[in-house]
Image (cartoon, rainbow, N blue to C red):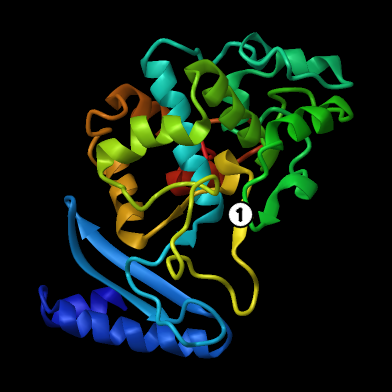
Amino acid sequence: MFTACASVSQHNYDALKKEVRATLQCELDKGGTSVSYAVMQNGKLLVSDAVGYLDGTKKAPATTDTLYNIGSVSKVYCAAAAMKLVDDGKIKLDDPVVSYLPEFKMEDERNKDITVRMLLNHASGIPGTSYAIGLSYGQYDTRMYEKVYNSMEKSSLKAEPDKFSVYCNDGFMLAEMLVAKVSGMTYSEFMEKNILAPIGAASSGFADRDFAPGSYAVQGTLPHEFPNVMGSGGISTNIADLCKFGQLFLNRGQGVISDESIREMTLCQGKTFIPEDNLARERSIRQIRFW
């Protein structure tokens, strides 16, 4: 769709917007509240638009300033925060997690073998998701970390650490807690100071902030959700500021994260249980990375 429009006129962004809007509206008509998109190149926002409404009442239209929770894309932000601490010499990827989070205990003593790297490449062996503590409605759960530690103490690993990589939300929850503990800040404060503010992503943030009425899109008649799992799925942002974060990886870290850390994040990481993983070798887009 984008290529077809561009072939008519490289800079005819009004035509592009019109065609994309029509396509997205067709999809929304099948079931949905709103959607926004943006195209950014070399740090310049070329085109952006929003289609639909803030909620199922269809009274207030969504705009390009509307905030959306971006779910597991938040893991990339968490990995970037961890790599910032690596750049600052405050953590090492192959150190045990318990050396930074001594409160992290499990019934399975092998948890002491889990490294920071294993949290970020899904190779920790930790069971994937504690759904009971993931979301709340009305406000952020300030007892989140206490509940995570309590849940972990009653859990065992599902695999030997670093044996293979399987998607793990709780690993990124622990990575979030590690960033907060080592930095001496709340996770949201660290992200704001070291990642979001330097790239000018003023709209981006977490559920522990105040939201202006009408700033946030929800699905249908559902209430505003507050993701307590900031590191694994808690970022809310508008579309333009999401693009600004993506620019970090196209512009060698922009001085926010080192070029070395950006390269580390894009290397093939983790372990596969597939004997001959040709697809991962041949198509780097499918490699297991730090997200």
Q: Residue at x 78, y 23 (%)?
A: 160
Question: Looking at the picture, which amino acid does disc 1 mark?
Answer: Phe
The quadrant of the picture occupied by the N terminus is bottom left
Q: Is residue 72 above or below residue 114?
A: below
Q: Residue at x 61, y 35 (%)?
A: 172
Q: Is residue 151 left or right of residue 238?
A: right
Residues 18 and 276: in front is: 18
**Res. 270 in view:** no
- Element under label 1? strand
Q: Residue at x 28, y 33 (%)?
A: 253
> Can you tell which quarter of the image residue 166 is in?
top right
Q: Is residue 30 above or below residue 137?
A: below
Residues 241 and 113: in front is: 241
Q: Is residue 71 above or below residue 11?
A: above
Q: Is residue 35 above or below residue 158?
A: below
Tally the marks: 1
Residue 25 image point, x, y percent: 42, 87
Residue to which mark 1 is pinned? 226
Q: Is residue 266 left or right of residue 174?
A: left
> Can you tell which quarter of the image residue 168 is in?
top right
**Res. 92 in view:** yes
Residues 59 and 38: in front is: 59
Residue 180 image point, x, y percent: 54, 25
Badge 1: residue crowd in 10 Å (few <14, some 14–19, many ≥20): many
Residue 283 image point, x, y percent: 45, 47
Q: Residue at x 39, y 67 (%)?
A: 66
Residue 256 image point, x, y percent: 28, 30
